[in-house]
Image (cartoon, helix red, strand yellow):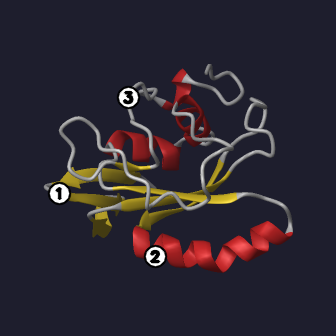
Amino acid sequence: MQFRYSRDGGDIVYAVDGQTRFRAEEIALCYTEPDDPDDLKDVVTLHKHGPVDAVQEWYNQKRPIFDKIGIRLKMISSSEWDADDLDRFINCTGSLGPWLRKHGMLGSQPTYLHEQSLQHPGAEGGLHSGRDQEGVPAACDEVAPGQESG
């Protein structure tokens, strides 16, 4: 099966084997991060991706469960995602962690980041995390989990 994100005008489109599953103006990611964000051996795990409302609902249901077992569940959303970044996050295990680490978003950020917005130069919506998106690896094999640099 092939999982792909693409851009169509102002929408971000998600397709499986060429068939559109959803389109949205803004996409959210829900993930867990390691106990120690500086421990490069631990991997950030992507649990859910999609339109903000659907991911927010899942997050609201699951967060108490994750909290109970001591795992940090976080959510980030943007209308300005690069489709290649989203593809890498969903298709390449371990690729979200280096992106978050490079952008200083592990450990210290609030759990739900949608309300904090920093616009990219020339961007309308921005990434709702307080960071920009430049310098992301271009392919899955460019940064192996545990080998990323700060």
In front of the other: label 3 or label 2?
Answer: 3
Q: What residue sits 75% from the left and 31% below the top? A: 38
Instruction: Give the residue at x 55% y 62%.
Output: 112
Between residue 71 and residue 91, name the one nearer to us: 71
Q: Position of residue 138 (x, y in %)?
A: 41, 27
Residue 17 quadrant? bottom left
Residue at (60, 33) in percent of width and height: 101
Q: Sort mark 1 into few (<14), some (14-19) or many (20+) by Cα contacts within 10 Å.
A: few
- Residue designated by label 1: 10
How far across and down, in percent of the image, does residue 119 sit? Answer: 30, 44
Which residue has dot 2 on it?
54
Give the crowd class for mark 2: few <14, some 14-19, many >=20 residues within 10 Å. Answer: few
Residue 30 located left or right of residue 85? right
What's under tag 3, amino acid-wise? Glu
Q: Real-space Cα distance between discs 3 and 2?
A: 27 Å
Q: Quadrant of the C terminus?
A: top right
Is 102 placed above or below 127 here?
above
Give the CA distance from mark 1 to mark 3.
Answer: 20 Å
Pick the residue in front: 87 or 106. 106
125 in relation to 92, above or below: below
| Residue 85 in picture, x, y percent from top left | 41, 40
Residue matched to label 3: 134
CA–CA distance in space, label 1 to label 2: 19 Å
Which SS class for mark 2? helix
Q: Position of residue 120 (x, y in %)?
A: 28, 39
Q: Is residue 37 left or right of residue 97?
A: right
Is there CB contact under 8 Å for labels 1 and 3?
Answer: no
